[in-house]
Image: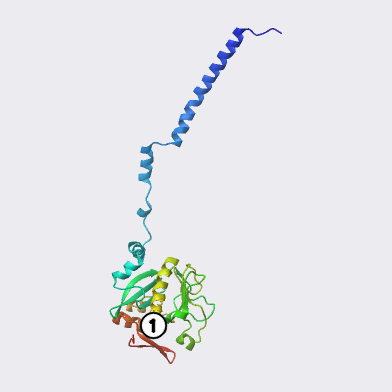
Amino acid sequence: MKKKGPFSRFALFIYAVILIVLIAYILEPTSKETTKKKTPTSSTQSNKEKNQPKIEDKEESSSIFDWLKKEDLSDADFDKRLAKIGAKAGDKVFIRIFKKESLLEAWMKVKGKYVLFKHYPICKYSGYLGPKLKQGDKQSPEGFYKVTRRLLNPNSKYHLAFNLGYPNKYDRAHKRTGSFLMVHGECVSIGCYAMTNSKIEEIYTLVDKALRKGQKYVQVHAYPFFMTEENMVDYQDSKWYDFWTELKKGYDYFEAEKVPPNIKVKNKHYTIHEANE
């Protein structure tokens, strides 16, 4: 076989170099283009950020309780919020619940009258407007209830809970059945009034400390809605109108006196009496 001379080896070397240069030239634009796509300039990034809507700029759904969210954010410190109304944990407590508005109110006794401490949005309740009638109807109760120390449950599987004391004397007089109707956390309800865990922690603390300090019981008034004259007219055709009329008397007493009334049951009806605190 004839051996290749030096010239042939040199020629092959030259061809290889040329081929490598050509390949590099062909691939170079693609590489640059890829780099540009992966690493945009800082000016491009800032323009995109300017066009991206911020979370706080998004329009929220309108609700009469949107301001509750702002209230929660504005005064995060529990003791400072109490101090603002001249109260402290351990002072007497009164609670009102409004189904339609999904709202729980905590009131504190300050200088002989009750002052609103805070509105708490109810995370979830079950059923419809109207009282609980029987075990298993998954209905959240309405009426006047008293929470004593034995009704507190710090070990609830729903974070924290206190039993409303349903059925009360009125409920039993009307042969209503059911048990373990509570205000608790975890935001799930099959007849209870469920709060978020952070909110039940505050509410439970107020109730627990008040009872430990000597308050005999904490009244909890559960209403279908704010019992204004306008709302009563709107619901005058309801089958529960007469029942709600009895509840309204308790609502009106507190609105006028800013002290929860003494509530009794006589002949299967609620009767409202002067506060005996």
Quadrant (top left, top right, bottom left, bottom right) of the C terminus: bottom left
Colour approach in the figure? rainbow
Q: Position of residue 85 (x, y in %)?
A: 29, 72
Q: Position of residue 59 (x, y in %)?
A: 36, 56
Q: Is residue 131 visible?
A: no
Asked whether, in this view, residue 198 is left or right of residue 23, the answer is: left
Q: Which residue is mark 1?
A: 247
Residue at 38%, 47% in the rendered image: 52
Q: Amino acid at mark 1?
A: Leu
Give the secondary structure at mark 1.
Answer: helix
Asked whether, in this view, residue 139 is left or right of residue 235, the answer is: right
Q: Nearer the viewer, residue 126 or 117?
A: 117
Q: Relative to 8, is 241 above or below?
A: below
Which quadrant of the structure image shows residue 110? bottom left
Q: Callout 1: 10 Å neighbours few (<14), some, many (20+)?
A: many
Q: Position of residue 186 (x, y in %)?
A: 48, 67
Residue at 60%, 11% in the rendered image: 9
Q: Relative to 66, is 96 above or below?
A: below
Residue at 43%, 36% in the rendered image: 39
Q: Relative to 9, is 222 above or below?
A: below
Q: Residue furthest front?
A: 213
